[in-house]
Image: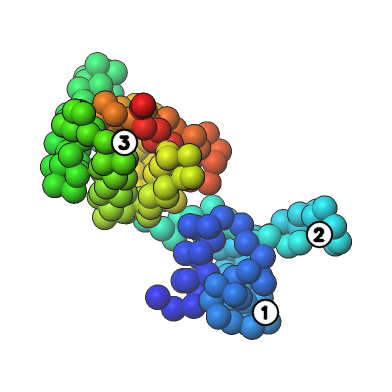
Amino acid sequence: MNTADHVLFLLKTRGPQTAQKLAELLDLTSMGARRQLESAQEKGLVAFEDVADKVGRPSRRWHLTEAGHARFPDRHADLTLQMIQQVRALFGEAGLDKLIAAREQESEAAYRAVLDAAAPPAEALPGAEAAVRADALAGRVRALAQARDAEGYMAEAEAQPDGSHLLIENHCPICAAATSCQGFCRSELQVFQRVLGDGCQVERAEHLLSGARRCVYVIRPLV
């Protein structure tokens, strides 16, 4: 990955950043980072906003534009939208629901195989110590993040001090389809809950289609 692409990647995965912070992450001088940002700005890939800090002068935070986000692929967006429109026209909303259900079943089977190979679900550990159950859940969340990352979601798992986990998806490769039919998003949340097991609760904390820059799911163990 060249430096220009790395700048875009960091803004995609970490959100708005100052030139100084990007310089630290890229091991560049501040001037070098600013030159990269200014070059990307000329191409319409990034823009900035001056944010007032509590102390001192405002800091300049750089972020991706719509064109910048478009540099990260949305899988076969035009074809997918055409297929959704055709299914609606030919079979109505009921037909589209059947399409989503079929995709849901396929995804669930694939994820379950990956997660079960990584760690057993909590319901398969009756009477196990809390630490064992916690380790199993952590392993399943990491495996799900790896599976989603391989599908283009730029996903990562983060363990939290309170014992919960975050499944963070910095990109949505089916964004066009999800925008046209939000049943795809609803379906994914349900699939995550089922494959992670009855020992946890899954909630969506941030949603790209609701204006957030990414999707974030909170997975809380059930005591």
Q: Position of residue 9 (x, y in %)?
A: 47, 64
Residue in front for this viewpoint, 64 or 61: 61
* Label 2: few (<14), some (14–19) or many (≥20) C-alpha neighbours in 10 Å: few
Amino acid under label 3?
Ala
Tag 2, which secondary structure?
loop
Camera-side mark, 3 or 2: 3
Disc 2 and disc 1: Cα gap in Å?
17 Å
Identify whether 29 is placed above or below 207.
below
Residue that protrudes farthest toward the right in the picture: 56
Q: Residue at x 48, y 39 (%)?
A: 162
**The C terminus, quarter of image:** top left
Q: Are marks 1 and 3 in contact (CB under 8 Å)?
A: no
- Amino acid at dot 2: Pro
Q: Earlier in the sequence, mark 2 or mark 1?
A: 1
Residue 30 circle label? 1
Name above or below for residue 170 compared with residue 57: above
Q: Which mark is residue 58?
A: 2
| Label of residue 130 in the image | 3
Residue 202: image x %, image y %?
37, 31
Callout in the foreground (1, 3)? 3
Secondary structure of residue under mark 3: helix
